[in-house]
Image (tube, helix red, strand yellow):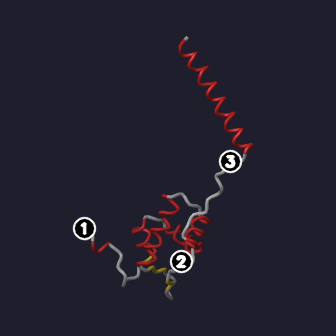
Amino acid sequence: MPDQESSKPTQDRYYTIGEVSTLCEVKQHVLRYWETQFEQLQKLTRLNGRRYYTKSDIDFIGELKDLLYTRGFTISGAQKFLATGRVEHESTELTPASQSNVKAAIADLQDAKQILKQITIE
């Protein structure tokens, strides 16, 4: 059984795409796609055509996986976030017409709730 410490990435070692895929729990084809979308992911390709990654690449892949899979970013959203370090939000302010629509919907829901209460009482 491999030692836990020996399976942790170290700074002075290069990792194959298969090793990175296992370490990061990301499929190899996904890693290859991410290489085309994120310039921060700098794989090294040797003469034999094999991809090699560094510890900093593995750290970046972990951050990217968190943004895409855990936090729900899209590829373009993650690209913008990584470029600026912040999330751009759309305005959440409602226009007067939208406020009126929301108030009408709430009133309709309250009426429906009252009708349902009367039905269950009967």
Q: Which residue is drawn at 40% across and 67% down?
A: 22
Amino acid on which disc 1 is placed: Met
What is the secondary structure assignment of the residue under circle 1?
loop
Tell me where residue 74 sits by quadrant.
Answer: bottom right
> Between disc 3 and disc 2, whose residue precedes?
2
**Residue lying furthest front:** 96
Which mark's residue is nearer the viewer, 3 or 2? 3
Amino acid on which disc 2 is placed: Gln
Count residues near mark 2 (Cα–Cα under 10 Å), then give few for <14, some for 14-19, many for 20+: some
Residue beneath label 3, please? 94
Residue beneath label 1, please? 1
Give the x, y percent position of residue 75: 59, 65
How far, Cα to Cα, is label 3 from label 1?
A: 59 Å
Q: Report the front residue among 96 and 17.
A: 96
**Residue lying furthest bottom:** 47
Count residues near mark 1 (Cα–Cα under 10 Å), then give few for <14, some for 14-19, many for 20+: few
Amino acid on which disc 3 is placed: Leu
Tell me where residue 1 sits by quadrant.
Answer: bottom left
> Between disc 3 and disc 1, whose residue precedes?
1
Q: Report the front residue among 19 and 5.
A: 5
Residue beneath label 2, please? 40
Tell me where residue 98 sits by quadrant.
Answer: top right
Does 93 sit above or below residue 68? above
The C terminus is located in which quarter? top right
Count residues near mark 3 (Cα–Cα under 10 Å), then give few for <14, some for 14-19, many for 20+: few
Which mark's residue is nearer the viewer, 1 or 2? 2
Do labels 3 and 2 touch, CB within 8 Å?
A: no
What is the secondary structure assignment of the residue under circle 3?
loop
Q: Which residue is drawn at 40% across and 82% down?
A: 14
Q: Report the front residue among 90 and 14.
A: 90
